[in-house]
Amino acid sequence: MALKETLDGGKFAVTTEVGPLKGTDISEIMELAEILNGKVDGVNVTDQQSAVMRLGSLAACSILVEKGLDPVFQMTCRDRNRIALQSDLLSASVLGINNVLVISGDYPTLGDHIDARDVYDLDSEQLIWTINRMNEGYDLAGNELQGKTDLFVGAVVKPVSDTDESFELQLTMMEKKISVGARFFQTQAVYDVEVFERFMKRAVQFKVPVLAGVIPLKSAGMARYMNKNVSGVFVPEHMIDDMARAKDKVATGLEIAAQLMRDLKDLSQGVHIMAIGWEKKVPDILRLANLA
Amino acid sequence: MLRSEQKPFEEILGYLEGEDKVFIVGCDGCAQASQTGGLPQVLEMKERLEGEGKTVSGCSVVDFLCQKALVASRLRPLEDTIMESDSLLALCCGVGVQTVAAMVKKPVHPGCNTINLGGSRGEWQGSERCMECGDCLLEYTGGICPLTVCSKGLRNGPCGGASNGKCEVSPEKPCGWELIYARLKETGRLDVLKTFIPPKDWNKMRPRPEMLSTSMWALEQMDTLREGGTV
């Protein structure tokens, strides 16, 4: 079922994501489209993830539409000004893409073109606002569109923060994003269900669906790397120990992810699985989590 | 030198909504030269605000609002009056607003927009920076400029990249939005974070042709000519 219908119907939604490769080889995306078809409500396509230049999200989303999936077109504010952003939103609509996820975007110096100029002509709140204007039939300059968009707009939120300022700011930004038209949220990866519950106790008042992020662990080293380098990711020590001791790291990583999803089911309106190389295993995780 | 122009009076009045007592600070440096925040403009602003039923608790014109030592020496004797006021209105460039906001635990409203001079950045005295964007947002950000303090220059709030209060771009740099949050919390103004800042008009950041003159003398001449005066 399409993502918007699932969420509007109050059903638990499952989304996952794929990252296009650097180059014109689309065989992997074609293969993943086959594997994921019918298994998930939506498939995000990342937009130059980690500021590394790759095939565009728009083209990859279009391939997924052709294959019968419901893609979520991720858009960062980093690389395009308001003219390019709006034009790509029109293009997305024409290509049959229904959903957009708005992100600020990692800074260019985190990627592989570190000397690039950043844009941020619009910030994420302003881009959400812009998409809603386009849904109403107008561009940012106030011109009427010949054929308006009908895009389902999502945004991101970081449910766990290491400072009180950051935690409170995330909640305020969530409220502001909703006030300008965000209709659903996908979160940074969650590993501590209790901490996530604390966030949801505050976020539930906004009455907008939240899809909790899940990243399956591949090793103890990966968990430690994320704790050190990825903002908002905190893998508890006992999980790192489990991974370090595990004989079958794949089975343990998938089981931890499945357990998280079972626990998150009562706290959120869906899950968003970021498999980071394990996209083909997403159907297995869903089976383990009783979500298949 | 930094050039400024006063914001429309209605915009300033909007900032003061719900407040009664306001303390006005002016600057005898660039703002005086720009005729936006010298003594005559401060007194004129006082009169106009009183005409709108506001109480002006006091006024002070400091030689250089960008210099913390001067600001401290001039405002300290007036501390009681200032702290009894609801807020301050600063008639000066963006650096001056940020300096005063950094030193006084009260909301500081910007009364001017700083005009882009196409590269001339003045002489800064502290850690406050102004991009001369021509459409000052300091009202909504606790007197800390998001264009200069946030690596991405985000206007509505932080990205998700900060770790332990540090920016994703450089671990030596604090997350600007966490600084803004702390300032707003300290001054009891967290509610302004909910204000949506619409897309910015970047044209206001481009230097106007007459500002591209390379000599200060030419700028001064222009002002004199505009007023029909003689040097």
Image: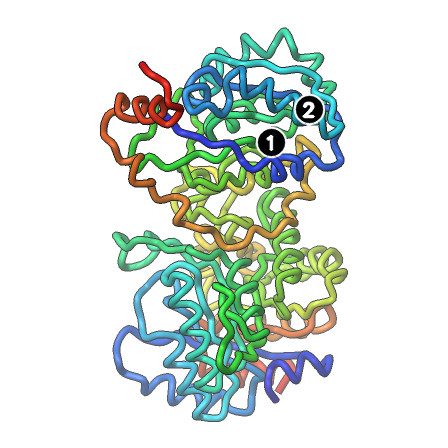
B222 vs A41, left or right, is left
**What kind of element bears circle 2?**
strand
For badge 1, the amino acid type reads: His
User: Closest to the observer: B218 or B16?
Assistant: B218
Taking the spot 45% from the left edge, 85% from the top edge, the residue there is A94
Taking the spot 49% from the left edge, 62% from the top edge, the residue there is A103
Q: Chain of mark 2?
A: B
Taking the spot 48% from the left edge, 86% from the top edge, the residue there is A96
Q: Residues within 10 Å of mark 1 (few under 14, many from 20)?
A: many
Q: Chain of mark 1?
A: B
Can the viewer see residue B123 in this picture? Answer: no
- Distance between the alpha carbons at the discs numbered 1 and 2: 10 Å
Q: Name the colour scheme.
A: rainbow
Can the viewer see residue B39 in this picture? Answer: yes
| Residue B109 badge | 1
Q: Are marks 1 and 2 in contact (CB under 8 Å)?
A: yes
Q: Position of residue B82 (x, y in %)?
A: 67, 17
Q: Give the quadrant of the N terminus of chain A.
A: bottom right
For badge 2, the amino acid type reads: Val
Taking the spot 65% from the left edge, 43% from the top edge, the residue there is B192
User: Closest to the observer: A95 or A219?
Assistant: A95
First of labels 1, 2 by sequence position: 2
**Which residue is tagged 2?**
B22
| Residue B147 badge | none
